[in-house]
Image (tube, grey):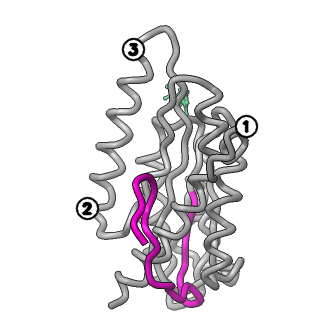
Amino acid sequence: MTTIKGPGAAETFDGSGLRIAIVHARWNTAIIENLVAGAKKSLFAAGVKEENITIQTVPGSYELPIGVQRLYAASQVQASNTGEGISATDLLSSTTDLSKTPTASAPKKPFDAIIAIGVLIKGATMHFEYIADAVSHGLMRVQLDTGVPVIFGLLTVLTEEQGLERAGLGSSGMHNHGEDWGSAAVELGVKRQD
Ligand SMILES: O=c1[nH]c(NC[C@H](O)[C@H](O)[C@H](O)CO)c([N+](=O)[O-])c(=O)[nH]1
């Protein structure tokens, strides 16, 4: 099947063994919430188990690269704690004493893929351009430095309506881009295991 916009149909991938994280910003949450829901819909459709999906938030899109990098590092520490890991939230806390391995149950492996979601809406200044550029380069650097696939879920839109459209909330019936990101996370996560 040939497409012009959006990814063409790919083979289906079994996500039942994957551990996925979603890191999302807390700006423009009316749009963000639907993007996250779309990503989760695709993860579930591929068999990813709810207990293997971790969701963390950061203040804004500019914090996505550091949020993704720290969460992945935390999941690596978790994996090295011989299965007695601790929650990713606790691992990110500066007050957690990692020398004591809490007994909270947690998945035993690092994340197979991380979806970074943010919505940048152009304002009257150049702020939008600087954040968009920094975040896109930052997320690419994190994925290449760590080797963990980081799905680029940053909407850079000129109007609120464009953002709503791309979250499947507009009047044009455009699909929810979050669904594409969930599918991409499963594909890259499975391929990373090959
Ligand atoms: O996620 C966003 N953050 C935004 N700014 C906050 C930024 O991401 C940082 O959180 C902030 O600069 C503190 O570092 C936005 N705007 O400024 O318009 C925006 O539209 N979206």
Q: Which residue is mark 2?
A: 144
Q: Which mark is residue 47?
A: none
- Mark 2 to mark 1 CA distance (whole Å): 37 Å
- Main SS type for the magenta part? loop
Q: Position of residue 151 (x, y in %)?
A: 43, 59
Quadrant showing the C terminus:
bottom left
Q: Position of residue 78 (x, y in %)?
A: 51, 77
Whether tag 2 and tag 1 are in contact, CB under 8 A, the answer is no
Identify the residue shown where x is 32% and y is 56%: 142
Q: How many marks?
A: 3
Q: Which residue is mark 1?
A: 171
Q: Earlier in the sequence, mark 3 or mark 2?
A: 3
- Mark 3 to mark 1 CA distance (whole Å): 29 Å
Looking at the picture, does residue 190 appear above or below residue 143?
below
Quadrant showing the N terminus:
bottom left
Instruction: Report helix, strand or loop for mark 3.
Output: loop
Bin the neighbour count of mark 3 within 10 Å (Cα to Cα): few under 14, some 14-19, many 20 and up: few
Instruction: Report helix, strand or loop for mark 1.
Output: loop
Identify the residue shown where x is 71% and y is 49%: 34
Q: Earlier in the sequence, mark 3 or mark 1?
A: 3
Camera-side residue: 154 or 75?
154
Residue 89 belongs to magenta span: no
Q: Which residue is mark 3?
A: 126
Q: Amino acid at mark 3?
A: Met
Bin the neighbour count of mark 2 within 10 Å (Cα to Cα): few under 14, some 14-19, many 20 and up: few
Q: Amino acid at mark 1?
A: Ser
Q: Which residues are magenta?
A: 1-22
Q: Amino acid at mark 2?
A: Leu
